[in-house]
Amino acid sequence: MKPKLFRDPVHDIIAFNTDDVCGRLQFALIRTREVQRLRRIRQLGLAQFVYHGAEHSRFAHSLGVTHISGRMLEQIGHRTALSDEEKMLTVAGALLHDIGHGPFSHAMEKIAGIEHEALSRQIICDPDSEVNQALRAVDSTFPEQVAALIHHDQPRSFRTDIVSSQLDADRLDYILRDGMATGVRIGVYDLERIMSMLEARPEHLVISGRATEAVEGYLLARFHMFKQVYLHKAVRAAEKMLEAALGRAAELLRDGASLPIINPALASLLRQEAMSSHAYTSLDDTDVWVALKAWTQASDPVLVELCHGLLNRRLYKTLDLATTDEDRISEAIEAACDVVRRRGGDPAYHVMVDRAEDTPYKPYVPDTSSTSRPIMVSRNDHLYRIEELSEIAHLLGRDRYEITRLCFPRRFREPITEAVEALLGPDFMISRRRPTGSYPLIGRKG
């Protein structure tokens, strides 16, 4: 039988050989209702407001992840014998790693009180889901095995590292895919070199020391993607606006207000009601956009303003605070809320606080509860943590960037800026003219 081919902008041709048990399983999963839903969920949410090319879906990313996982297994298989079950488990886990994401997942999860990880397990283990049925065709216990692999409920191994680690198929795909879609060319790294230098140990995925520079490039690419895309101030402001709009709608629904919502599952989600995996997977980005358009006709002025702002890209303005002092941050937030109150606004929806942080590489730290595992490098028949061999990895592991950012409507920009500056002084604020995507704080740990 001819392989099933997908033309992909990152990997060129993604092929699934249906004469092979792995390819057959991958294609069966791709055809399920739950995976097809991912076509209707954008990978980068509202990043399209800043990077207009960022229209790609979680489906495209998931295809890329299972493709990379297969390539990783193929490379490892040159030196290590792998069973069909091991390979099927790994590629299925890679394909389904995002299956629990809902529309605009990060904003929705905060309002609905859900976690996509738990929903992934629910979908995979639900006997009525098409994903579950495709997995049970392999073995009756296979859905539970895949869910355990995705959620770190199995002993650590090179298979778990392929699905979730600091050098996993997920990151290897999204850095390249998101960089291509956004036009951020600094997100490019040498995937082929990394692929050709992979090895396996029972408890670790390992990279040959000859690919150290390629892994450094990958870590730097991830660093720059966070700096320029994922934590971009306008992207984050849009996400906070969506969070505010969904939160306001949820509050109105709880108070008994009538809001036009086409998909009843969205109303259930906003009310934090229990729902089946089938109802949850009926939701996608379209349902939220339809609701936002309908809510522009609502009687609540706060909700109307938020929806118009999102539909017409009238985004909140931002003010970044260059301090990690929680007392100072609280004072700045209260000062901003006071400004909004005095001018007739609602601080709950007109002052949104964005807190974010990331460490480009998480080194091994003994005697901590961290679940992060270091990237392991083989050199001269010995294993080393990459930070032991790479000064770049060592430095990235010592740095973390933190952002505390106030987001508010344009009309409050000057009075909030003046109030915060009067309270904290100009040294506690980041210039509004700083280069796009730069961080207000990059601090050393320890």
Image (tube, helix red, strand yellow):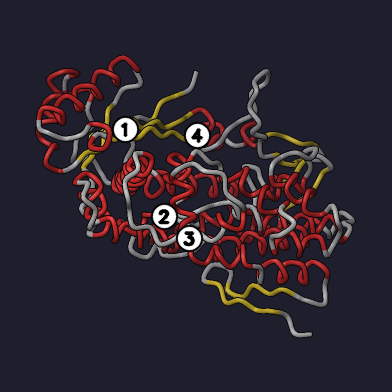
Q: Total marks drawn? A: 4
Badge 4, how many Cα within 10 Å: few under 14, some, many 20+? some
- Judge depth for marks 1 and 3 and give the one in front: 3
Tell me which residue sits at (76%, 65%) in the image.
134
Q: Find disc 3 in the rendering and name its residue.
A: 284
Badge 2, how many Cα within 10 Å: few under 14, some, many 20+? many
User: What's under tag 4, amino acid-wise?
Assistant: Thr
Residue 359's disc is 4
Distance from the alpha carbon under mark 2 to that under mark 4? 22 Å
Horizontal and vertical percent position of residue 270: 43, 45
Dot 1: what SS?
A: strand
Q: Find disc 1 in the rendering and name its residue.
A: 353
Tell me which residue sits at (36%, 41%) in the image.
247
Q: Along the line of sight, which residue is nearer the eye, 440 or 311?
A: 311
Among numbered discs 2 and 1, the one appearing first in the sequence: 2
Judge whether 419 appears above or below 306 on screen. above
Badge 1, how many Cα within 10 Å: few under 14, some, many 20+? some
Judge left or right: residue 76 versus residue 93: right
Among numbered discs 1 and 3, the one appearing first in the sequence: 3
Horizontal and vertical percent position of residue 209: 70, 45
Q: Find disc 2 in the rendering and name its residue.
A: 45
Among numbered discs 3 and 2, the one appearing first in the sequence: 2
Q: Are marks 2 and 1 in contact (CB under 8 Å)?
A: no
